[in-house]
Image (spheres, rainbow, N blue to C red):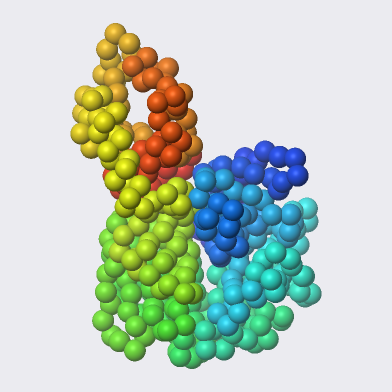
């Protein structure tokens, strides 16, 4: 991994989100145009559509993102956000840090209703990132600036403390003691048992570690580049590798569901959101996740075999595998729709549009909207994505430009 890719995490970039205004709604734009996610938290469940949504802190503002591939800019707070975290004792109590869009004035914010409304906490002297509450004592909160910062009154006031062990991506606080910290750094996973005064290795590797999390039960999870997603109970000594699928990407934010510890959400360096339903061993895209079930994948596989396989090949390997430039008298032959070509360069909506309306690349790719239902087309996309690697899922749509 080029070190400059990781070091970019320490520089605050203004994220430009391509937004369009819809009457009566917050500004809405494609999620794959978001370049950086600084934090992620659950947003209120969308009952009408029966899907999960998330709040994401970006330097453009607070966005609410949905599995339909769109993100909405929330009307408040009107700040670029560098960090955000919810109290482990009360999920409705949220702290956020950011800067005003005009003068870039540091601002600390608090919400008591899960991010719907916000109040400014006076006295902010710097913007903070990697905000993390102590699970054992949520009045104690740590955060990063160019220094290690601590609040002992739930985020109302802050002071610097201890030292930082080099370039730090992320912090976590032990579930057993608020004095025990874990830091994900450029030179590995570090641990301090004295509030950041001194540090030692927590995992025997010098590889960059980009994320660390400790849940209320004391389970530590970290991402170590070229090793994988690792975990252990704080009371145990041995680490377990959950997955090595992230070999071309790296995790920056980690969220474990409060009711179901097997449901994990992460954001990666491309700003994609990925989901695991089995504790981190297997991963799927958040975009389209409302339809990502074994039943819908099976339906999509049958539809593909019946309608698409004759041109696109078994398992979507393409009409002429290995030769995406192959043509016939009508134009380009049917491309691979697995990892071998550029199917994953398109969003779910883009793929659905091509299936529905056909393609100018070859007249044999007809418009299927009069033949297949919207559900059928959605299930086809779900099936196609089930054959993609994690890297393709993380680089889908506009994100492929940084992959």
Q: Is residue 227 above or below residue 20?
A: below
Picture coordinates of residue 330 (x, y %)? 32, 11
Q: Is residue 233 visible?
A: yes
Q: Residue furthest top?
A: 329
Q: Quadrant of residue 326?
A: top left
Q: How many marks?
A: 0
User: At 48% across and 91% down in the image, what residue appears?
Assistant: 177
User: At 59% across and 48% down in the image, what residue appears?
Assistant: 71
Q: Quadrant of residue 335?
A: top left
- Quadrant of the rendering where the C terminus is positioned: top left
Return the residue nearer the eye: 174 or 314: 314
Q: Is residue 53 left or right of residue 244?
A: right
Q: Is residue 268 visible?
A: no
Return the residue nearer the eye: 340 or 97: 340
Q: Is residue 204 above or below residue 106?
A: below
Q: Is residue 278 above or below residue 134?
A: above
- Quadrant of the rendering where the N terminus is positioned: bottom left
User: At 49% across and 74% down in the image, what residue appears?
Assistant: 258
Picture coordinates of residue 275 (x, y %)? 41, 59
Q: Is residue 207 left or right of residue 134?
A: left
Q: Is residue 72 left or right of residue 253?
A: right
Picture coordinates of residue 213 (x, y %)? 44, 74
Return the residue nearer the eye: 378 or 23: 378
User: At 30% across and 64% down in the image, what residue appears?
Assistant: 281
Q: Is residue 176 above or below residue 258?
A: below
Picture coordinates of residue 236 (x, y %)? 30, 87
């Amino acid at each position: 991994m080029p070190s400059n890719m990781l070091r970019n995490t320490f520089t605050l970039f203004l994220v430009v989100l391509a937004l369009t205004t819809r009457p009566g709604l917050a500004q809405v734009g494609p999620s794959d145009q978001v370049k950086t996610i600084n934090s992620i938290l659950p947003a209120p469940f969308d009952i009408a559509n029966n899907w999960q949504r998330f709040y994401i802190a970006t330097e453009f503002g607070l966005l609410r993102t949905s599995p339909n591939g769109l993100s909405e800019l929330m009307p408040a707070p009107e700040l670029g956000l560098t960090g955000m975290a919810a109290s482990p004792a009360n999920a409705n109590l949220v702290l956020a840090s950011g800067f005003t869009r005009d003068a870039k004035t540091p601002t600390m914010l608090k919400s008591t209703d899960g991010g719907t409304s916000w109040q400014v906490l006076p006295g902010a002297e710097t913007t903070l990132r990697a905000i993390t509450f102590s699970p054992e004592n949520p009045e104690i909160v740590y955060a990063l600036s160019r220094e290690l910062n601590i609040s002992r009154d739930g985020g109302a006031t802050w002071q610097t403390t201890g030292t930082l062990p080099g370039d730090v991506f992320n912090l976590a606080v032990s579930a057993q003691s608020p004095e025990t910290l874990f830091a994900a750094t450029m030179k590995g996973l570090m641990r301090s048992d004295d509030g950041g005064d001194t540090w030692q290795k927590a995992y025997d590797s010098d590889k960059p570690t980009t994320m660390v999390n400790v849940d209320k039960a004391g389970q530590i999870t970290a991402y170590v580049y070229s090793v994988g997603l690792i975990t252990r109970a704080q009371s145990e000594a041995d680490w377990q590798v959950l997955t090595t699928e992230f070999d071309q990407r790296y995790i920056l934010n980690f969220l474990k569901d409060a009711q179901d510890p097997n449901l994990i959400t992460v954001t990666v360096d491309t700003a994609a959101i990925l989901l695991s339903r089995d504790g981190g061993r297997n991963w799927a895209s958040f975009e389209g996740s409302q339809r990502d079930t074994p039943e819908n994948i099976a339906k999509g596989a049958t539809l593909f075999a019946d309608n698409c396989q004759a041109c696109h090949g078994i398992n979507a390997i393409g009409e002429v595998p290995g030769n995406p430039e192959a043509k016939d008298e009508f134009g380009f032959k049917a491309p691979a729709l697995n990892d071998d070509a550029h199917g994953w360069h398109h969003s779910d909506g883009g793929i659905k549009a091509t299936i529905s309306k056909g393609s100018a690349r070859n007249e044999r790719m007809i418009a299927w909207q009069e033949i297949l239902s919207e559900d059928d087309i959605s299930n086809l996309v779900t099936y196609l994505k089930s054959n993609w690697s994690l890297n393709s899922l993380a680089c889908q749509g506009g994100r492929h430009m940084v992959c």
